[in-house]
Image (cartoon, grey):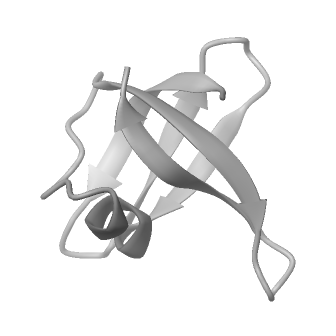
């Protein structure tokens, strides 16, 4: 599972981005993934482990979030 740091998350808009620690770029994260993980929100600079999933629209996003 990749580990990254929350770069930005806006709970009002329902999305954010996680910067991967290995430098491979940022991963999109949707509010539904945060809710499924049992988290209320994500905080800037919080370390998160996650998996990447390709959605029906072909976009890749972070899922199965856990505190790292």
Q: Residue at point 44% right, 45% down?
A: 65
Quadrant, the N terminus? top right
* Viewer-closest of 13 and 47: 47
**Residue extending furthest bottom?**
56
**Residue extending furthest left?**
40
Above or below for 66 versus 17: above
Q: Position of residue 68 (x, y in %)?
A: 37, 19
- The number of numbered discs placed on residues in the rendered structure image is 0
Q: Position of residue 39 (x, y in %)?
A: 19, 54
Q: Residue at point 72% right, 12% down?
A: 22
- In the displayed structure, does residue 27 sit left or right of residue 46? right
Q: Residue at point 24% right, 45% down?
A: 42
Q: Residue at point 65% right, 44% down?
A: 51
Above or below for 1 versus 51: above
- In the displayed structure, does residue 52 sit left or right of residue 65? right
**Residue extending furthest top?**
22
Q: For residue 38, which quarter of the picture?
A: bottom left
* Viewer-closest of 13 and 20: 20
**Residue extending furthest right?**
58
Q: For residue 31, which quarter of the picture?
A: bottom left
Q: Position of residue 6 (x, y in %)?
A: 38, 33
Q: Position of residue 12 (x, y in %)?
A: 18, 74
């Amino acid at each position: 599972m990749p580990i990254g740091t929350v770069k930005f998350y806006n709970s009002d808009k329902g999305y954010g981005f996680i910067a991967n620690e290995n430098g491979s770029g940022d991963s999109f994260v949707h509010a539904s993934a945060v809710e499924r993980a049992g988290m209320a929100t994500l905080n800037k600079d919080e370390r998160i482990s996650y998996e990447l999933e390709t959605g029906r629209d072909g976009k890749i996003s972070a899922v199965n979030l856990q505190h790292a």
